[in-house]
Amino acid sequence: MNIIVAGDGKMGSTLTRQLVLEGHDLTLIDANSKVLESTQERYDVMVIQGNCATMEVLQQAGIKEADLLIAMTGADEINLLCCMTAHAMNSRLHTIARVRNPEYTQQIYKMRDMFGLSMAVNPERQAAIEISKLLKYPGFLKRDTFARGRVELVELKLNEQSKLCDVALNDMNNIVKCKILVCTVLRNGKAVAPDGNFVLREGDRIFVTAPSNELAVLLRNLGIITHKVKRVLVCGGGRVTIYLAKQLEKSGISIQIVEQDAQRCVDLANLLPYAEIVQGDASSEILLESEGISNCDALATLTGIDELNMIISLYGSSCGVPQIITKLGRVNNKNILENLSLGSIISPKELCCNTIVRYVRAMQNQTGAARTVYSIADGQAEAMEFLVDEHTSHCGEPLKQLKLKKNVLVACIAKGAQQEIPNGDSSFNRGDTVIIVTNGDRVIYQLNDIFE
Amino acid sequence: MNYKMMGKFIGLLLMVESIFMMPALIISLCMKEYSSVMGFTVTIVILWGLGVLLRLLCRKAKKNFFAKEGLVCVGLGWLFMSLLGCLPFFLSGAIPNYVDALFEIVSGFTTTGASILEQIEGLPYGILYWRSFSHWLGGMGVLVFLLAIPMGGEGGSGFTMHLLRAESPGPNVGKLVPKMKQTAQILYILYIALTVLNVIFLLAGGMPVFDAVCTAFGTAGTGGFGIKGDSIAGYSPYIQNVCTVFMLLFGVNFSCYYLLLLGQIKSVFKDEELRMYLGIILASILLIVWNLRGYYDTLEETVRHTAFQVASIVSSTGYATTDFDLWPGFSKAILLFLMVIGACAGSTGGGFKCGRALLVVKNMLRSVRQLIRPQRVQVVRMNGQTVDEKVLANTNTYVAAYVIIIIASFLLISVDGFSITTNLSAVLACFNNIGPGFEAVGPTCNFASYSLFSKLILIWDMLAGRLEIFPILILFSRTTWRQR
């Protein structure tokens, strides 16, 4: 597909990498020619220097032949203007704009119609929703939901006390006593697709699919003691914090926000009457101590500086905070973060990138595209949700008779209200929802792609 | 330095070269020229073997590939390609001296067309074909060809930009479409289409098939190897005129043709470089015709020969229909000027390139204005767009390197004792990839009389001229080879 990406910042370059990998024709627009130069030397793309909201530049970028425009510049207003102008020049163009100012959240659906947007993305809001999901089930490093929230894919880290250490996957059911499936194991930074004889070890990070109503059972049987999160300490008062505070207000979790800038604190206090705002330097241990870091239920480090977030999270973990969430802007090399106790790592731009990639894949094949796509195991594996429709082959045949591609796993089949963790005798039928996990570089665009 | 990735590329390059040598082998077989059959067979086996070996050794290449690797890869690639590509000449006995054979093939690949052969007629057909085909191959660039074919995932990365930049001529190389592979394919499709058109026009004039194909190869690459001792002079006026037109066409930036296909005719003719190119040609023809009045019998003959010679020199082809060395001084001076200016950037032609000359002049005028009014802030524009200061700085560096190399080569080959005109025109003709010069290296003579040392210098000049100096110059820099 012919895709134009306006804005070659952090977000833009993450997207570029993924979309080029999937074989699309990309044209990048940015005002800064230095950034473009270095991007062009790294990826096989064309670059145009200029203001992406002007018709001349859009013309140069080939807007007439483009299928999709993704506006990712730093300014919401330019993104909107860019999409509106582009849409006027090419009416069959799909447009995606990044709109992240909290003031626009209320009206985003109306704005979508007004500006002719196909989709509006908001990485910070997505991150906040992700964090609030994690806070509801402490104990998991990552939680992705499928089939309208009925199936979950959770990430667990096995520490030395874990009951699962040195257990083969075949024997796992005796311990957890519920229907779960381990789809991927991340060991020493490499994703492994395990079979029944695979023995788990300390330090492994495992990715498990389970029906949502079994999660509590799973946690209990694994001996992970979880008490409900009642008080969260948040460092940094940026956009994610605002969205998060609004989310947490609904679930009745109290929130303390530490922010350095005095004026920003006043703004936050205006905006979030429910939260407790503290003005001060979040990197100061004395301040964190006096705000009760040692007895809060969860710590979220959401400042704009990655290094600061990491340091505060490490300090929090040394103070014994049960759940830690670290926001990172750049996660190019997750291996080096492996051994640090940073808790769950949330990257807004990665979340947003996943959303857009999912949209692009759906555009590519109108029928049978994935409904949900999550990248798991540090991007080495993907979990996708598909609806079985009339075009799907091999309906009703037991899985053991099917020849699936290497590294493809059917992780869950949701039939109506029932969720089934499949074994060799399971089969899927029209109307079911199937969750597929793939390891490696292979891209699955539609359900039929999983068969040999 | 990522030697393995470079090895992988060069391995592929050698394999592709061996495939391109097959038609020459087949022609030799058909004509029962057994000495050249042997030469081609041995070379193909060596090329293929080395290529496979290099690729096997460099299987596990890392993907970090930067500007430096791109430049070195192009420089080394051309060097290896030439060192091995001249083997058929040497092994078949057509050119008994290895350095002479190397001179001939480098002259072919760099589309220079300067020959050391005293007698062209009577050479085996396979050898003649390979000689002309080397022009076609070198014209658009072999690495650009590699970028056009699927290479098992290597083509998809951004570093291929470094290869395109290093091999394609011009101060500001860019892609036509987002994907490198498609850009390279478009370039080659245009190139092939124009070549086929040229062959058809030549055949229509009653030229024998073999002659037509070889002449078209020489024209397309703006090379200039003829298969006759008197170049194009022996063919009919129609054929000479067809050559004139196509030589000029191949000197135009290929992205202009792409824009024409897209229907953007206006923007093509607004292109400043194209206007300058056409303007220079027209002015040169008029001036030389005026200067040559009374030299030929009819006006038609004067115009035809003038247009042909001007087209041949400005596009850096080097075909000839008349001995222009006998022309009056003013006409020769104009030809010398055309040698230096050369064709458009992004064409198959050589020389300094019109676009670059335009940038240099504009930048110079700006500096002069700056001297008079130091406070004035100005930018250099080209086709209505501001030219990046980095491009201007690179262009100025290029001028310096260009002049220094010409002077140094001129001094070095002067040892052989030829006249100043001969030496200077020899250097200019080789470095700008033209072919014939004046006096002892004029259109009716050849480079055979130069010493071994001078030939090596001229070989270096031809490579440096084709690759626009830096990919070759960087091979001689200590910083390139130092481990980091």
Image (cartoon, coloured by chain):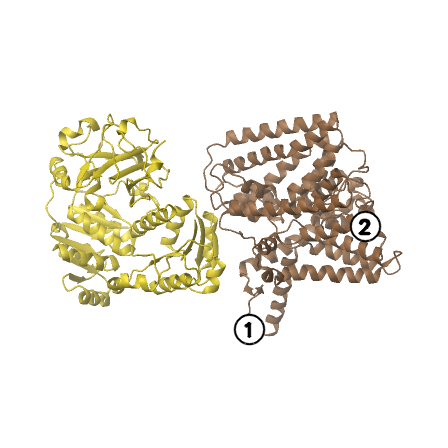
Chain colours: A yellow, B brown
Quadrant of residue A101 within the rendered picture: bottom left
Would you say A43 lies left or right of A216 here? right
Would you say A317 lies left or right of A91 here? left
- Residue A420 percent across, percent down from the top left: 19, 35
Q: Which mark is residue B376?
A: 1
Q: Chain of mark 1?
A: B
- Residue A393 percent across, percent down from the top left: 32, 34
Of circles 1 and 2, the one toward us is: 2
- Rounded to the nearest angstrom, the CA distance separating label 1 from label 2 is 55 Å
Q: Earlier in the sequence, mark 1 or mark 2?
A: 2
| Same chain letter for marks 1 and 2 | yes
Along the line of sight, which residue is nearer the eye, B314 or A367? A367
Three-letter code, disc 2: Pro
Three-letter code, disc 1: Arg
Q: Which mark is residue B237?
A: 2
Instruction: Give the residue at x 15% y 64%.
Output: A273
